[in-house]
Amino acid sequence: ILAFGGGLGSTVINDAMASLAPTLGESIVIYNITGKGNIERAKEKGVGIANYRAEEFVYGLHDAMAAADLVITRASATALQELAGLKRATIAVPASQLGDQQLNAKLFQEANAVIVVRDKELTDTSTLAKTVQEILHSPAHREQLAEALHVFARPKAASDLATLIIAANNG
């Protein structure tokens, strides 16, 4: 499992991952990208947990996302688009104070492309563990989520935008 809360991270997600790891068994590893300034707290919470790894920042996040069976992340447009292109099963945790993430989560959830978990739900480790286990132990469910999310991918977005700009410029 790869978990990250964006460049600044999310203490709510970080704390939940350290609590979740022991409930999953050692064969399921959580790789938690904590975000700037959150690494010490995450490492303290993760002391002695064999299947929990925390890093403040990682170069090659794209590769880490591609390698994950499941990604737990904020519902930012950038993260969800990247995961759509990679076809990764995703649990989206919209930041409660960010309206755009709330809208993103709703849109992707209505398309059955992500599982949405709210910040306040992350404190219930047993519910989160059940959701994660259901996804991890069902290849069909992971594939369904990944395929539905992939519908949102726009691999030629830059080229398409350039074409529109050129067309508009040419009148």
Image: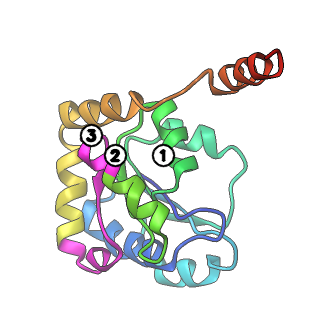
Q: CA distance from mark 1 to mark 2?
A: 9 Å
Q: Count neighbours of disc 3 (C-alpha within 10 A) and say few if under 14, some if 14 to 19, many if 20 or more.
A: some
* Three-letter residue code for mark 1: Leu
The residue singled out by tag 1 in the image is 80
- Quarter the C terminus occupies: top right
- Mark 3 element type: loop
Cβ–Cβ below 8 Å for labels 2 and 3?
yes
> Residue 124 lies in magenta, yes or no?
yes
Q: Residue at x 18, y 38 (%)?
A: 138
* Three-letter residue code for mark 3: Ala
With respect to residue 165, does 28 lie above or below? Answer: below
Q: Count neighbours of disc 1 (C-alpha within 10 A) and say few if under 14, some if 14 to 19, many if 20 or more.
A: many
The residue singled out by tag 2 in the image is 108
With respect to residue 120, does 34 lie above or below? Answer: above
Q: Nearer the viewer, residue 166 or 41?
A: 166
Q: Residue at x 72, y 17 (%)?
A: 163
- Mark 3 or mark 1, whichever is nearer to me: 3
- Image coordinates of residue 134 in percent, x first then y, are 17, 49
- The magenta span reads 107-126
The residue singled out by tag 3 in the image is 111
